Image (spheres, rainbow, N blue to C red):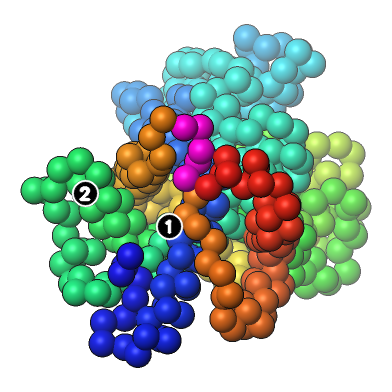
Amino acid sequence: MTIGTLDGAPPKDRAIAQKFYFAAWRWHFYAGLYVVPFLIMLAITGMVMLWFTTIAPEYGERIAIPVGQRALSVTDQAAAALQGHPDGRIAKYIAPYSPTNPALFQVDLETGNRMVALDPYTGKVVQDRAQDGTWNELANDIHGTLLIGADGGVGDFMIEIAASLGIILLATGLYLWWPRNRQSWRDVLVLNLAARGRAFWKSLHVTTGFWMSIILLFFLISGLSWAGVWGGKYVQAWSTFPAEKWDNVPLSDKTHAEMNHGAEKDVPWALEQTPMPLSDGQSGVAGLPEGVPVVLQNIVAYARTIGFDGRFQVNAPADKSGVWTLSRDSMSYDSIDPTSDRTIHIDQYSGRVLATVGYADYSVPGKAMAVGIALHEGQLGVWNLALNALFCLAIIAICVSGIVIWWKRRPQGSLRLGAPPMPEGMPMWKGAVFVMLALSFIFPVAGLTLLAVLALDVIVLSNIPRLKAALN
């Protein structure tokens, strides 16, 4: 077999190149066994989330309503939202996207929260549905946890393994299909529509994979930033906005992450692990004019005087020490501009501003994630939505073509998986160990997984002939 060798190179160099080729192919195969089902799942759930967050939101915020002469006061709107739920409490107000869209109110009940979409001109309820049980929430939960525990649980860890190995899959794939042996860049860059059978599927796999490689790497790394180990314990923990910047403000044991709704992420990534401030009636700087009641109507009016326009959100205090929170950010689909992120906390007793943080206050990783997550979730406009939908379809095509290539190559008439053979006497093993250790430091889960697979390949399979035969 000559593929993977170097034309015109000395025999020793050709032999080394061939060993590296088969080693990369074997690792590509191993990674694909685990990663491919997860990539298909992530692509499908990703498209579902794109649909229900940008095209057909389920809470009714995109319902078209006629523009009236004058909107009701926010107080009257809240009263109208509570008419159907007299025992409820307004927990959140979301301003309309535009004059032709309804306002949203989150009504908390002992039996479960409701999301009420309200015509702000007439007070008519245009939609009233449970906050939980949406298709977007289900897709989000599968996408992040496989419905196996909360963030940081078993499902989250399994997906983090898949995303980490996905980087290995990407790197080995690029190495395998980099032009060599009389191949040209045309073979990689242009789909061979004239090919038939396995050759066509191979061309589809190579061409689509190459064009999608940079985007896939971006999606894998931005997705890993949400994961329990690399994100929660490693990157996000080091990149969180420091609450110490809020001078002389009492802090809660609760973090901003508690404002998220289940698996759905509403709070900016850079703020999730930051402690919330507490209301004490004394701290903070001037906010609402002195003597003005600190109620929803006046909080909304204050928000508009300091530049909040279009869609923004007001979270009411959750308890006696809680705060009013004004926010406008792309994580909550309020804006298509992540650099305009803005969060303000207001004392519920004095109306004084306890804390203000915007995009400019984020760390460099926090700023990168604010933009990166917006791109990842298709929040930057129609072009972003179309690009992400195309990317999801391309990922499915890559995975399906990889399965077909394997199926057509596997040993016929047997139950063997047909893994590429492990090369003997691999050169420069010390360099490979160094690379693995470096990878383990950067992506701990990927490193641990590679070590586990290496132990399985070298120690277990080498000593159990039947298992080795079944795999090979």
Report crowding for label 1: few under 14, some 14 to 19, many 20 or more residues within 10 A (C-alpha): some
In the rendered image, which residue does mark 2 sit on?
Answer: 199
Residue 57, above or below 186:
above
Residue at the extreme front of the image, as rendered: 465
Q: Amino acid at mark 1?
A: Leu
Start-end of magenta stretch: 414-418
SS at mark 2? helix
Q: Quadrant of residue 425?
A: bottom right
Looking at the rendered structure, the kind of residue marked 2 is Ala
In the image shown, does 113 or 374 lie closer to the viewer? 374
Residue tagged 1: 216
Indicate which label's residue lies in the foreground, 2 or 1: 2
Image x and y of residue 347, in percent: 80, 51
At 45% across and 16% down in the image, what residue appears? 126
Q: Is residue 139 magenta?
A: no
Counting from the top left corner in percent of width and height, residue 370 is at 54, 61
